[in-house]
Structure formats: structure tokens, C-alpha cells
């Protein structure tokens, strides 16, 4: 018999997987807009299931594994199929379609496997080794969103070469050993009393702000890592 406290977080995790599944179907049908927004809604569910689990103290190994499998569908396979659909629009890039789309899915799943191997189910949020897979998905859909918005104003910002680059770089960052801070540490410049307003503003301007937030998160962590490497080299030179 499943304890009641586990029902809510697992139901939200199931919703995450459902939204990822709907995104895949939308991509297959060529409905890029729906595919993008289903992935975003899956991100919302991914954030809510953790908060719900903390509220009810409902952490378990089953929940951790279920969450990872759902993330594999919503942030690994769904963006990969979206990439495949988008790249398939231009026959010139046919040789790159499957390799680029698959490498993202592969690295995303490997990222989740690594996470499960090195972590245990708990209410503590540690920093990450490699970029979290939801941000990998966010980089892909936010680039498409900003390009769609630019088109409405008569600007064509979309480039298949840039899109492929974003996809491959995101894949590489997910399986890297570069430390990534939790989002609350990256966006700690926003005072806690204004955080709710900050989040509301992001949601209201999501078609633009998701691009800024997701890429700021990457750049901030890469700069932090670069500074750390320089500091370590500087320290070791004195030790020598």
C-alpha cells in the first residue's frame, strides 16, 4: 500500500512525463509551438514535484528514479525529437540530423544516470556536476522561442548552424564535470523579498526571458569555473 504522502509528488512527476510524451507527439506532427510549450510545462512540474516532496517529507529511492525516468522523456528524448524535426526542415543538413539529435538524447540520459549514481534521495539540494538536464532543454526551446518572436517583428534570427551548435554544446555540458551551482545561488543578486516578483516577471515575459535566464545560467557557471581554475593554478604555482 502506497503511503498518502507519496501520491502528490509522484502524480506531479507522472504529469511531467505525460507532458514530455505530448511534446514528442507534437514534434512528430510538426507542431513545433506545442512541442516547445509542453517541454516548458514539464519543467514547471519538475520543479513542483521536488517542492511537494519536501513539503510532505516524501523522499524515496523510487521517487528519485521515477523523477529521473520522467526527466529522460521530457528533457532528453522530447527535445531530441524536437531537434530532429527542426533540422529535418532543411534537406542540406540531412547528414547531421540524426547524429546531432541523438547525441543530445544520449548525453541527457547519461547525465541522469550519473546523477542517480552519485546522489541519494534527500531534501538537500547540492550543486551539480555538469549542467542539469532541464537547463539543457531550456537552451534548445528558448532559442526557438526567441527566433519565433523575432520573426513577428520581421527579423530572421534562426540559423540551423547556431541551433546545432547550441544542441551539441548543451549535450557536452551535461556530461561534463564542470560544477554548476543551484539556480538559487546563481540568481542570489535578487533580494528574497523581491524573488516572487522576479519570477512573475520572468513568466510574463517568458518568450524572451527564458533565453536570457537559461544562457545567463550557463555563462555564469562557466565564468565561475574559469575563475576557480585560474585561482587553483595561481595557488599551485606558489606551492611549487
Image: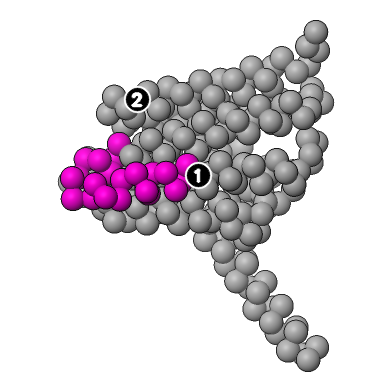
Dividing the picture into quadrants, the one containing residue 29 is top left
Viewer-side label of 2, 1: 1
x, y percent for residue 228: 67, 71
In the image, taking residue 162 as reference, residue 184 lies left or right, namely right
Residue positioned 69% across, 30% down in the render? 65
What secondary structure is the stretch in magenta mostly built from?
helix
What stretch of residues is rendered in magenta? 85-106
Q: Is residue 96 magenta?
A: yes
The one nearer the camera, 201 or 51, is: 51
Vertically, is 198 above or below 32?
Answer: below
The one nearer the camera, 50 or 95, is: 95
x, y percent for residue 233: 69, 82
Query: Which mark, by number, is residue 32?
Result: none
First of labels 2, 1 by sequence position: 2
Q: Is residue 203 visible?
A: no
x, y percent for residue 207: 38, 39
Query: Which mark, by number, is residue 106?
Result: 1
Colour theme: one colour
Vertically, is 19 above or below 173?
Answer: above
Residue positioned 37% across, 29% down in the render? 35
Label 2, label 1: how far apart the Cα atoms are = 21 Å
The one nearer the camera, 101 or 74, is: 101
Please, what secondary structure does the residue beneath circle 2 have?
helix
Please, what secondary structure does the residue beneath circle 1 have?
helix
Residue positioned 63% across, 48% down in the render? 183
The residue identified by callout 2 is 26
x, y percent for residue 30: 27, 28
Q: Is residue 226 magenta?
A: no
In the image, taking residue 183 as reference, residue 134 lies left or right, namely left
Residue positioned 53% across, 44% down in the render? 108
Vertically, is 179 above or below 61?
Answer: below
Which quadrant: the C terminus?
A: bottom right
Amino acid at each position: 500500500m502506497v503511503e498518502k504522502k507519496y501520491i502528490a509528488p509522484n502524480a506531479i512527476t507522472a504529469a511531467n512525463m505525460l507532458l514530455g510524451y505530448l511534446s514528442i507527439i507534437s514534434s512528430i506532427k510538426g507542431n513545433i509551438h506545442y512541442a516547445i510549450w509542453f517541454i516548458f510545462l514539464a519543467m514547471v512540474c519538475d520543479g513542483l514535484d521536488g517542492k511537494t516532496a519536501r513539503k510532505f517529507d516524501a523522499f524515496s529511492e523510487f521517487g528519485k528514479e521515477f523523477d529521473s525516468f520522467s526527466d529522460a522523456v521530457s528533457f532528453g528524448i522530447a527535445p531530441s525529437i524536437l531537434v530532429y524535426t527542426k533540422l529535418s526542415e532543411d534537406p542540406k543538413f540531412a547528414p547531421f540530423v540524426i547524429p546531432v539529435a541523438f547525441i543530445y538524447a544520449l548525453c541527457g540520459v547519461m547525465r541522469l544516470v550519473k546523477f542517480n549514481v552519485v546522489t541519494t534521495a534527500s531534501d538537500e539540494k547540492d550543486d551539480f556536476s555538469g549542467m542539469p538536464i532541464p537547463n539543457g532543454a531550456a537552451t534548445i526551446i528558448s532559442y526557438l522561442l526567441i527566433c519565433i518572436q523575432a520573426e513577428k517583428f520581421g527579423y530572421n534570427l534562426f540559423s540551423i548552424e547556431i541551433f546545432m551548435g547550441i544542441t551539441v554544446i548543451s549535450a557536452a555540458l551535461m556530461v561534463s564535470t564542470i560544477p554548476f551551482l543551484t539556480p538559487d545561488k546563481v540568481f542570489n543578486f535578487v533580494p528574497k523579498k523581491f524573488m516572487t516578483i522576479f519570477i512573475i516577471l520572468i513568466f510574463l515575459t517568458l518568450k524572451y526571458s527564458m533565453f536570457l535566464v537559461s544562457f545567463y545560467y550557463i555563462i555564469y557557471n562557466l565564468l565561475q569555473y574559469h575563475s576557480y581554475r585560474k585561482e587553483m593554478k595561481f595557488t599551485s604555482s606558489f606551492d611549487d
